Image (spheres, grey):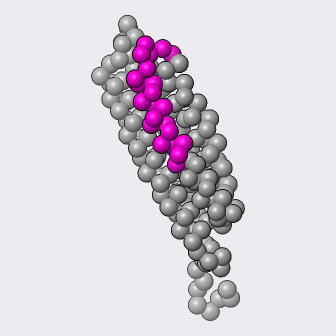
Amino acid sequence: MRKAFVIVSALSLAAFALQFIFAAVGAFTKPAGDDAYALHSVNGMVVIPVLTLVTILFAVLAKAPGRTVGLAALPLGLVVVQALIAGLANGSTDAAGASTPFGLTIAGLHALNGIIVVHVVVSVHQAARRLANLPATDVAPVAVREGEPA
């Protein structure tokens, strides 16, 4: 299960890297229609959440420490924040439908949150690799107080 955890965390990291590429595709598509960000949207709203859930599952099955399982779950919450930020940025337009300074600032937070979530996913992948390199008996050690049975 540890190797599977490493593999799925690497796939998740790849999906997040592709997310930046898909955002650039949307930004540089001319003319920019409603479907310019289709790849970005599908990857961010379907592929990434599914891979994150699978990563959480494999972290649990690999008997990763609770902190690592929690770290594996964090991208799911950050993806929800991404969707909220994007919705707020897209909704922050003037009467003519043009971007406002407030909307553009919020859009910048969307990019910043994307960078943060990539750092989290990198940390998850590093934790998975460390776990995979431990001997099977070293998984999720439990602290035992002196005098208590192990």
Residue 28 in the image: state x and y as whole percent.
Answer: 40, 23
Q: Which residue of the protein is positioned furthest toward the left in this rendering?
A: 101
Residue 113 or 19: which is nearer the viewer? 19
Let me know if residue 21 is in the magenta part.
yes
Residue 83 in the image: state x and y as whole percent.
Answer: 51, 32
Query: Total marks drawn?
Result: 0
Q: Which residues are magenta?
A: 13-34
Q: Which residue of the protein is positioned furthest toward the top in this rendering?
A: 96
Vertical comparison of 95 with 48: above or below: above
Residue 147 in the image: state x and y as whole percent.
Answer: 62, 92
Res 49 quadrant in image = top right
Q: Is residue 85 visible?
A: no
Res 58 quadrant in image = bottom right
At horizontal 62% and vertical 45% (from top left) the residue drawn is 51
At horizontal 45% and vertical 24% (from top left) the residue drawn is 26
Q: Which residue of the protein is positioned furthest toward the bottom in this rendering?
A: 147
